[in-house]
Amino acid sequence: MAKFKIVSEPGGGVRMNVPGKPYEYEKDGLGGVDAEIVEAPITSAEAFLSVARDADAVYAANFRISRQVIEGLQKCKIIACGSVGTDAVDLVAATERCIPVTNDPDTFIEEVADHSMALLLSMFRRVTLTDRMARDGRWREARPYLYQFPRLWGQTLGFVAFGNVARATALRAAPFGVKMLAYDPYISELNMTRYGVEPVGLKELLQRSDIVSMHAPNTPETFHMLREEHFRMMKPTALFISTGRGSTVEEKSLINALQEGWIAGAGLDVLEVEPPAPDNPLLTMENVILTPHVASASARMEPERRRRVGREIALVLSGRRPMACVNPTVLDKLPLLKWVPQRG
């Protein structure tokens, strides 16, 4: 029998088909920690606890790790999420029980930044629309159409939230000659200006930007962070890019903004409801580019995401602090050694 028990929902939160044995990457991340991974039913909190009650660690994915579940865990030392978001976990309850909750904030930053730039460039140069013109025999319409728009050099790009993805996007955008602004009340100005980004308030950012790139995380404070009043502040020529979380934008207001010309277009990888209903107007708008929440996807992302879950669990079960804890106040209450990267 293994020393530690890790409980997961069926499938371990795997969101795409990746070659390999079940939990191969999670076990790779666990290294030499003597642990077994057991799947629990997710039909109810009681059913989950029937297996997880004596778990040393919980691997969270889509099943709600509610207060009821957390209070039923008798010896859990960590709840590890294999995503940036920790929506599935009741953080207040976990913190009250002094259980660290970890996420995976940095294994796919480069991919999302690449996708943000792809949407930005595609929207600015109207790539999908002119692609359709070329395919529909409207070859001569594209060049006169693009004469209506300025060049990207000298335009103003505004970041709503300036975390890891926005910073990586700023590094990619700078060589295109754009001016950059950012609004983020949780990031110091020095962490903006070192990227060549001017810190401003949200209203000023929306009024000055030619392109607004949304990167806010999904939290209670950011729900519908951008609403009608905000889209009305933007230039009628402005473009809106979103690769963060769909819940941060009031979709009805965004649709109105696009239909009524408050803004000129949008490039969206995330929507408020996914997948969208067949009658969602965004699906038929020529001034919108949609991708199906794929910004983080790459051949590297899924295996590394799952290894990260194993590493975080291994650190805590071996008495060390995790790399990414979203409720860090609990760490000072636990007898955990500081995590130090190993050389070699």
Image (tube, rainbow, N blue to C red):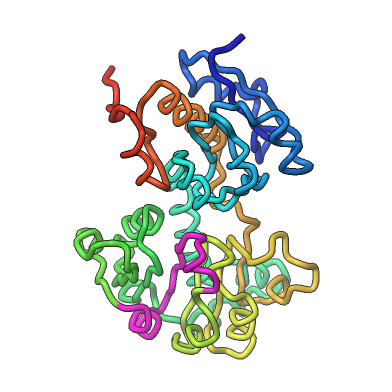
Q: Residue at x 61, y 9 (%)?
A: 1
Q: Residue at x 45, y 63 (%)?
A: 215
Q: How many marks?
A: 0
Along the viewing direction, whichever of 209 and 141 lies nearer the viewer: 209
Along the viewing direction, whichever of 29 and 318 lies nearer the viewer: 318
Left or right of 199, for residue 48:
right
Quarter of the picture holding the C terminus:
top left
Q: Residue at x 32, y 68 (%)?
A: 185
Tell me the quarter of the picture where residue 14 sits.
top right
State whether residue 33 is above or below residue 105.
above
Residue 117 part of the magenta segment: no
Left or right of 177, for residue 250:
right
Tell me the quarter of the picture where residue 317 sits.
top left
Residue 207 part of the magenta segment: yes
Tell me the quarter of the picture where residue 234 sits.
bottom left
Query: Residue 261: x and y, percent?
Result: 57, 89
Q: Which residues are magenta?
A: 201-224
Query: Residue 220: x and y, percent?
Result: 51, 65
Along the viewing direction, whichever of 165 and 247 lies nearer the viewer: 247
